[in-house]
């Protein structure tokens, strides 16, 4: 996987789930450290990093983040009915965490190495069923990107990441899929685990 220039002192948001490139994330923000994160990112236009939690919880003591995560750019924010801040963010490039530190307020900061985006490869015929399954799931589950399926159904990377979002994978499986650097290998592994989800 090709890497680009390191970024220093990026705010990290450890979560119990995984954000994939081009994915959408909705968050409810209430802790001061994350309100500061949102203020910083909206002021500077910089992304923040989303990493799956390896140890700990989303709230309270600082959690230990996975070494590979996804950059997230805030696209919208609003005040929710409960009075808390809600944000919407879009997944961008993946990255590897080089080192982390924890600020006095508990916010995790990291130096990261961005990963170059995956090559755009067509979906091989042997994985055509996966694109069909993605279309059906998008019709049923109505994700925000459902109208993009027809245009991007022959992009192996995009199809794989969207299936990872919609199939009932556990968090560790999602993290494994995020860390794969071959979109065709990701499709092969998704095909191999599909029987788990078929109704008996």
Image: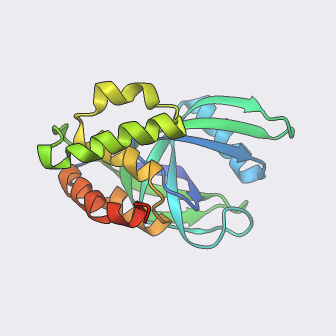
Query: Would you identify the image quadrant in which residue 153 lies?
Result: top left
Q: Is residue 1 above or below residue 40?
A: below
How was this image coloured? rainbow
> Going by the image, does 92 lie left or right of 141?
left
Q: Is residue 91 above or below residue 172?
A: above
Residue 126, how many percent across, how many down? 14, 49
Q: How many marks?
A: 0
Q: Is residue 6 visible?
A: no
> Going by the image, does 142 lie left or right of 92?
right
Q: Quadrant of the N terminus?
A: bottom left
Q: Is residue 173 visible?
A: yes
Residue 123, how many percent across, how many down? 18, 41
Q: Is residue 94 above or below residue 154?
A: below
Along the line of sight, which residue is nearer the eye, 12 or 132? 132
Q: Residue at x 29, y 41 (%)?
A: 131
Q: Residue at x 20, y 58 (%)?
A: 185
Residue 48, how many percent across, how many down? 53, 45
Q: Residue at x 53, y 40 (%)?
A: 141
Along the line of sight, which residue is nearer the eye, 199 or 67? 199
Residue 200, how many percent across, how many down? 43, 66
Residue at the farthest front position: 200
Q: Is residue 160 above or below residue 100?
A: above
Query: Would you identify the image quadrant in which residue 136 lies?
Result: top left
> Going by the image, does 175 lie left or right of 141?
left
Q: Residue at x 49, y 65 (%)?
A: 171
């Amino acid at each position: 996987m090709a890497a680009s220039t390191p970024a220093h002192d990026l705010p990290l948001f450890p979560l119990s789930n995984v954000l994939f490139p081009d994915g959408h994330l909705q968050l409810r923000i209430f802790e001061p450290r994350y309100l500061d994160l949102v203020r910083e990112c909206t002021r500077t236009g910089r992304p923040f990093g989303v990493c799956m939690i390896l140890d700990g919880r989303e709230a309270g003591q600082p959690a230990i983040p996975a070494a590979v995560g996804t950059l997230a750019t805030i696209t919208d924010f609003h005040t929710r009915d409960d009075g808390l801040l809600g944000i919407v963010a879009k997944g961008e490039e993946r990255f590897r965490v080089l080192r982390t530190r924890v600020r006095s307020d508990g916010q995790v900061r990291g130096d990261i190495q961005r990963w170059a985006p995956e090559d755009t490869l067509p979906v091989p015929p042997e994985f055509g069923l996966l694109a069909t399954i993605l279309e059906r799931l998008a019709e049923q589950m109505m994700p925000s990107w459902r109208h993009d399926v027809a245009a991007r159904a022959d992009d192996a990377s995009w199809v794989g990441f969207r299936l990872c979002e919609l199939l009932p994978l556990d968090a560790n499986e999602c993290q494994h899929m995020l860390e794969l650097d071959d979109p065709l290998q990701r499709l092969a592994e998704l095909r191999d685990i599909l029987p788990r989800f078929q109704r008996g």
